[in-house]
């Protein structure tokens, strides 16, 4: 799919971003393991979460989706309880979803049957050794290419023993997999993080009755004494999706966008901190709690930004937002440096290389580092042909660049956005079309 874009004269409106992808995955998997029915409102239906749902169905979990309405898409899950999963007759296909593969690997490591997890060509190149090694240490039998380094993964689960494990790389997916395995293990499982990562798993499992504690960078979980309780919740808007509109509004010369009901979990809100530090006119209002997660309404207006230094513990809190942050830096006077983000090399694409290469096509001055980017701001970007490389984050970041560039930007592979934000291009076109209609009305009335 090809998407053509030009910068509108104004950018104003309200955008209801889709439900948080990370929370949607977890709400489906955790409620599948609970005993009883649960209702999940504003569930994100994208390619990644569909992969999770299809894997759960293959494992014997019943679920249904009610699309549309004031509650957004509603997922109803009929949890099978701690011993209710069944061996799948088919290979479990995580498609392009690393979250599906890693979290399900943790679940399957504790099940007394055999499973095979695979994915598309991109996912089969992504590192799985970081989750395979500790699961083996807990007692699971796990095989994969390169001695478990890459998918497909074959898992023969069974009795596990809790371990104390320090992750060499900060990863919420690995942490979550080990906590899920720890629910079924003998004794306590403790996971130490080298830097804080998103804590949706801890919040949700605790709300479902798991015995879980956190202190000084270590998360501890005790094995289940009974059953997880099903959890009804409303999924907050995805801050990673909201980030595209935040950058677009901050950089556009005549913009004001309102983003209601966005999740502002402090382990995910690094993009807000960085944009504010750069000088963005960004308002966070009506802060509240929703399903155990902090939520707020965000408004962003045209701003004059300055450069930033992004590194260290801040990076895991905005790792998915780096491509669109690079777009912001490309149009910000001065030098912005992003370091300690080597994890971007093993995402849906090598996001350091692809972000650098595609922004250069638009006239940005970007230098590739082993673990990040150095960006020298330019006065303007110029529209040009671009390629998503099959990466949803990059596709949408280029969409934002197209809203800000002079001339026409053409994005090949724009359909990649469907992985996490199926309505992204429709929302973008609605905003642009609305301004075109308003401008024509103003001209017609002589105002």
Image: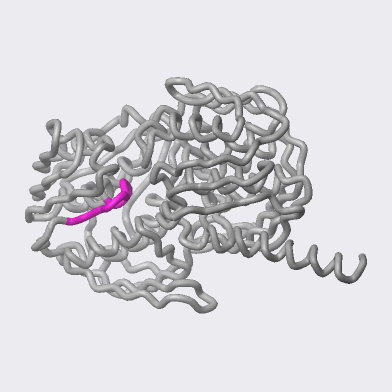
Q: Is residue 281 left or right of residue 64?
A: right
Query: 35 and 213: which one is in front?
Result: 35
Chosen colour scheme: one colour
How many circles with numbers are drawn on the protein?
Answer: 0
Q: Position of residue 336 (x, y in %)?
A: 62, 25
In the displayed structure, would residue 372 be above or below residue 302? above
Q: Residue at x 65, y 22 (%)?
A: 335
Q: Position of residue 165 (x, y in %)?
A: 26, 32
Q: Is residue 446 left or right of residue 435?
A: right
Q: Position of residue 416 (x, y in %)?
A: 42, 52
Q: Quadrant of residue 168?
A: top left
In the displayed structure, would residue 55 be above or below residue 246? below
Which quarter of the image is occupied by the C terminus? bottom right
Query: 281 and 439: which one is in front?
Result: 439
Q: Quadrant of residue 406?
A: top right
Q: Is residue 297 left or right of residue 209?
A: right
Residue 93 painted magenta: yes
Magenta residues (range): 92-100
Q: Residue at x 13, y 39 (%)?
A: 144
Q: Quadrant of residue 146?
A: top left
Q: Residue at x 43, y 66 (%)?
A: 43
Query: 204 and 223: which one is in front?
Result: 204
Query: 427 and 241: which one is in front?
Result: 427
In the displayed structure, would residue 96 be above or below residue 330? below
């Amino acid at each position: 799919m090809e998407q053509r874009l030009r910068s509108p004269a104004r950018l104003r409106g309200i955008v209801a971003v889709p439900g948080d992808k990370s929370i949607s995955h977890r709400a489906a998997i955790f409620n599948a393991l609970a005993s009883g029915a649960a209702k999940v409102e504003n569930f994100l239906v994208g390619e990644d979460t569909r992969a999770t749902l299809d894997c759960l169905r293959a494992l014997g979990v019943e679920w249904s989706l009610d699309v549309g309405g004031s509650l957004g898409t509603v997922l109803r899950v009929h949890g099978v309880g701690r011993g209710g999963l069944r061996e799948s007759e088919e290979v479990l296909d995580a498609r392009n979803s690393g979250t599906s593969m890693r979290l399900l690997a943790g679940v399957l490591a504790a099940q007394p049957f055999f499973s095979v997890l695979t994915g598309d060509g991109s996912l089969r190149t992504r590192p799985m050794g970081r989750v395979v090694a500790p699961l083996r240490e807990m007692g699971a039998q796990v095989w994969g290419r390169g001695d478990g380094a890459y998918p497909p993964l074959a898992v023969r689960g069974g009795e596990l023993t809790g371990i104390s494990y320090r992750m060499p790389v900060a990863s919420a997916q690995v942490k979550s997999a080990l906590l899920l395995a720890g629910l079924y293990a003998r004794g306590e499982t403790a996971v130490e993080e080298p830097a804080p990562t998103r804590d949706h798993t801890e919040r949700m499992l605790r709300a479902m009755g798991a015995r879980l504690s956190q202190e000084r960078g270590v998360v501890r979980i005790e094995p289940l004494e009974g059953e997880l309780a099903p959890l009804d919740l409303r999924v907050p808007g995805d801050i990673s999706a909201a980030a595209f509109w935040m950058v677009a509004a901050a950089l556009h010369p005549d913009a004001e966008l309102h983003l209601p009901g966005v999740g502002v979990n402090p382990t995910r809100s690094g993009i807000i901190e960085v944009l504010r530090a750069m000088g963005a006119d960004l308002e966070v209002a009506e802060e509240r709690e929703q399903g155990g997660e902090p939520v707020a309404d965000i408004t962003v207006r045209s701003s004059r930004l300055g450069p930033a230094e992004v590194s260290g513990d801040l990076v895991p809190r905005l790792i998915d937002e780096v491509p669109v942050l690079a777009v912001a830096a490309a149009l910000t006077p001065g030098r912005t440096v992003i370091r300690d983000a080597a994890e971007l090399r093993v995402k849906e694409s090598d996001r350091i290389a692809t972000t650098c290469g595609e922004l250069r096509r638009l006239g940005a001055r970007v230098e590739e580092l082993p673990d990040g980017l150095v960006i020298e701001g330019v006065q303007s970007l110029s529209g040009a042909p671009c390629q998503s490389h099959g990466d949803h984050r990059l596709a949408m970041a280029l969409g934002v660049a197209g809203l800000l560039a002079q001339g026409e930007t053409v994005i090949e592979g724009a359909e990649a956005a469907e992985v996490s934000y199926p309505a992204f291009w429709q929302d973008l076109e609605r905003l642009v079309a609305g301004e075109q209609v308003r401008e024509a009305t103003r001209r017609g009335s002589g105002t």
